[in-house]
Amino acid sequence: MNNYQDDLLGMFLTKPELLDITILKPQFFDKKHRIIFNAVKKSYHENKTIILEDIIAQKDVDMDLVVACASSTATTAYFEYYQDYAIREFKKKAVIATSKRLKDGEIDLDEYYKTVNDYSVLGASSSTKLSKDILIESISKHKKNIKFDKFTILEKKLNLKENDFVILAGGTGVGKSALALNLMDDLSKNYPCVYFNLEMVSEELYQRLISINSTFAAKTLEQYETLPQIKLEQVNNAIDSIASRKIDIVNNSITLDKLRSFIMTYKSDKHFIVFVDHIGLIGVRAKGSYERMTEIAKELRKISLDNNCTIIGLCQLNRDATKSNSKPNLAMLRDSGEIEQSASKVLFIWREDYDDYSIIIEKNRSGAKARIAIGYNKQNQIIYELSDKRDLRGG
């Protein structure tokens, strides 16, 4: 990684939003790269974008080096890795230089240990000293609850809070994606939403959203150009409603690193909701199935805590669960060990017979288990809550 400084500056040039989250400081770069780093920061903070002409015009900037950095092919998905590498390299060089100063008699042993200790904490997480105000605030100001518009029973029973990591599980063809899209449609009226679509054809997802909002089945939407005026207006109103909200769809396959990078750099002044459909399709380096899901679950939990988002990840059931008619339990999650540990809440969409559906809350760190009866109209993909009478944990 001899050109890691080129690659880091290249990432800042192509995705300047990274400057808002980086912990890198000018001293982590050599002199030539440091000048460019300062110029890039200055341009971004003044213009909210990068203007290459302004950077090249800065005093002592190496124009050829700017071009080399801008030509870097390093992907921003590995930004954290490159950033950590830059900090480690700086520490290594700083400690060697400090040791030389001790050897040459320029500093004494006490100053040596103090300086080395200062370097050792660079890039480390900071701690919080507990005070009376902090302790009082912890019991008087609670994390905000996520507000639903349509799913009011679910809101009450689930008690979903900002930064939760939620698993939504179900068997193949039961309606996981349909429920996720209905939840996104509901939540997008109050929150920005990001939907990582790793399984459906993009057009199918869009059509499902239009069906949910227009109440028309897919077959009706396929006749869009020849619809009667009243139905056409209803469909167009549904389209306008969806387009007026802040909904981002990521349709291509994605690695865990790219997902993390997308969320870290997602621009939103408000808390946002992330859907991942489904987590088993996220690319990771781990090889074994259990190891893969362990890495994914741990990282998604960490991402939800470190960013201004709540994550709802869809999960398949294991093979044994698909052969059983027993009610959902956490052991049914595919490669369940770390998933059930990392998730703050686990929901199942469950079909007991042909048209008898429920949302079952099987794990709930901020509430009780519950069972919520729902209706599912497959024609228009609409899922809705039924009477509260059956909203009790079934035996």
Image (cartoon, helix red, strand yellow):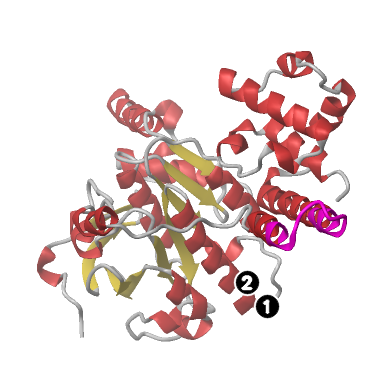
At mark 2, the secondary structure is helix
Residue at point 20%, 78% (across, down): 393
Percent across and percent down for residue 6 are: 82, 38
Give above or below for 190 relative to 346: above
Percent across and percent down for residue 183 are: 34, 52
Residue toward you, 378 or 186: 186
Percent across and percent down for residue 255 are: 65, 56
Residue at point 47%, 41% (across, down): 206
Q: Residue 73: in sight, yes or no?
A: no
> Dots 2 and 1: beta carbons under 8 Å?
yes
The image's mark for residue 288 is 1
Q: Is residue 303 a member of the stretch shown in magenta?
A: no
Name the amino acid, label 2.
Answer: Arg
Q: Which residue is mark 2?
A: 292
Q: Residue furthest left?
A: 389
Magenta region, residue range: 98-112
- In this rendering, position of residue 112 left or right of residue 215: right
- What distance separates the C-alpha of mark 2 from that of mark 1? 6 Å
Residue toward you, 236 or 326: 326
